[in-house]
Amino acid sequence: MIEGVRPVTDLPKDLLVAPKWQERLDELAAKHSVPGAQVGVIALGEDGAADIRVITTGVTSLNTRVDVDADTLFQYGSASKIWTTTLIMQLVDEGKLTLDTLVVEVLPEFTIADPSNTKEITIRQLLTHTSGIDGDLFNDTGDGDDCVEKYVDELATAISVTEPGGHLSYSNAGFAVAGRIVEVLREMTWDEALVEYLWKPLGLTHIITKAKDAPLFRTAVGHVANPDRTSPDKVIPTKQWLLPRGIGPAGIITGSVSSLLTFGAAHMRDGLALTGERILSEESARLMRTPQFDLTAVSSVDQAWGLGWILSDWGGVTSAQHGGATIGQITRFHTFPELGLAMAVVTNSRGGGALAHDIEKEIAQELDLVLPEPKSEPNAEDIDLSHILGTYESTTVRIELTRGEDGGFQVQNFAKVEIDGEPPAPPTKVVPLSASRFLISNESASGEMAHLTIDGEQYLYMTRLFKKISD
């Protein structure tokens, strides 16, 4: 048994086994308009064995109506970033770079719009979303093996949201740069590095990154809101299946929930795979779970960002987790290294976030864990938000924070660049939790938003920073 791991002795006998769990998953899928999903848990035994349990529901697509089974592939979305971080940390283990290595030392031609910022960005900043690189650039650079290289070249026009090392602002682009570093130092594509350095030692077979491989497996298709409000189908299949391959290191790994949990087991075993092969040193595995950026000023749910991982408190037990939201698919992935326990939910609809929240809460109760929820300060509902109303934006999204017809506060997001063809969501109610944190919630999801002032400028923080452009 790995030193320091306090395993759950056994999973509750009926967890995901008793018929009530299947019934509950089917019920939640219908409630939240999720055509298909997998839910899984894994518990490590003292002898190195693992108890993996998976339940499934629904179909891969409302077009084909093929049943979801335990081997069906779903898109992990941004949970892919933990895999890319692991590839980087392997290079750290081998002495090929350090976390404080400058990106330009490995990629001399790398540049963003601000040359001075370009020269200051480090590997650590890429992995903690503090590089300042504008995050949501989904340029399609083709399906060739040079697509990540081309994507990184196109970042020459990317603006800086903050100075390198400044406030955290989620950056998909930064992880594409990390993936390109893997390619250069491994002298192979990011996809090939995944296979050689992670999938083979982990013993994984139901996992892909390339769209051309999807027909070789039973593969889920994403679903988005149906613009035809008169249709009995609230969601419809997406027209695009996968994000461009060039942004792959940030979010295109596609696999079964079992494959995701098997990867999580290796991290909980401090880098030692269930196959007995080591994918990471103990030091690097633990360092990935060590706080790098404190989030308590902007969140009461997440405590800190590690290297790749997001850290939160589930009733006295730390979770190292990362979810994913891609084209009509939602993933949630939580590991509890202290317990030798992990859970994951993969879905093929935007409603998957609400489904995951509900079933994770019930699983947590069975395991004496407490799913973290946004916390409100006393009398927060009386806080006036008038002074922060206005329009905020990033390169790809505009956010309008306004008063609703009922006199309350509301927020609405508008995509400036279409990704999945989904129509704009209706305005979402905003409820103050404190003077700077707010709850936003609708039928399919809820979360926290925060207001910040940085160098005299106002921002909204929803993992990403959105700068105020008008009142």
Image (cartoon, grey):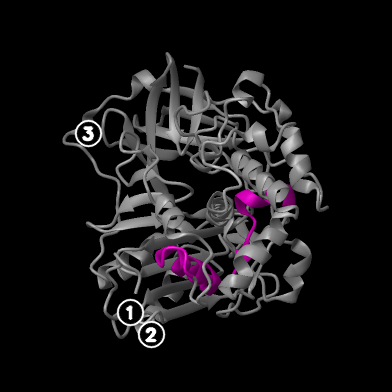
Residue 356 location (% of width, % of height): 43, 62
Task: Name the residue that disc number 3 marks.
Answer: 380
Which residue is located at x 72 percent, y 46 percent?
184
* Element marked by disc 2: loop
Distance of label 3 from label 1 (alpha carbons): 46 Å
Q: Residue furthest left?
A: 378
Residue receiving disc 1: 46
Counting from the top left corner in percent of width and height, residue 468 is at 49, 21
Which residue is located at x 28 percent, y 24 percent? 384
Residues tagged 2 and 3 counted as in contact (Cβ below 8 A): no
Q: Residue 155, position in %: x, y? A: 70, 32
Q: Residues within 10 Å of mark 3 (few under 14, many from 20)?
A: some
Indicate which disc, 2 or 1, sits on the residue closer to the N terminus. 2
In the foreground, 410 or 397: 397
> For the N terminus, which image quadrant?
bottom left
Q: Quadrant of residue 454?
A: top left
Q: Is residue 122 visible?
A: yes
Task: Kindly identify which residue carries mark 2.
Answer: 17
Callout 2 environment at 10 Å: few (<14), some (14 to 19), or many (20+)? Answer: few
Where disc 3 sits, the SS reads: helix
Q: Cα distance, mark 2 to mark 3?
A: 42 Å
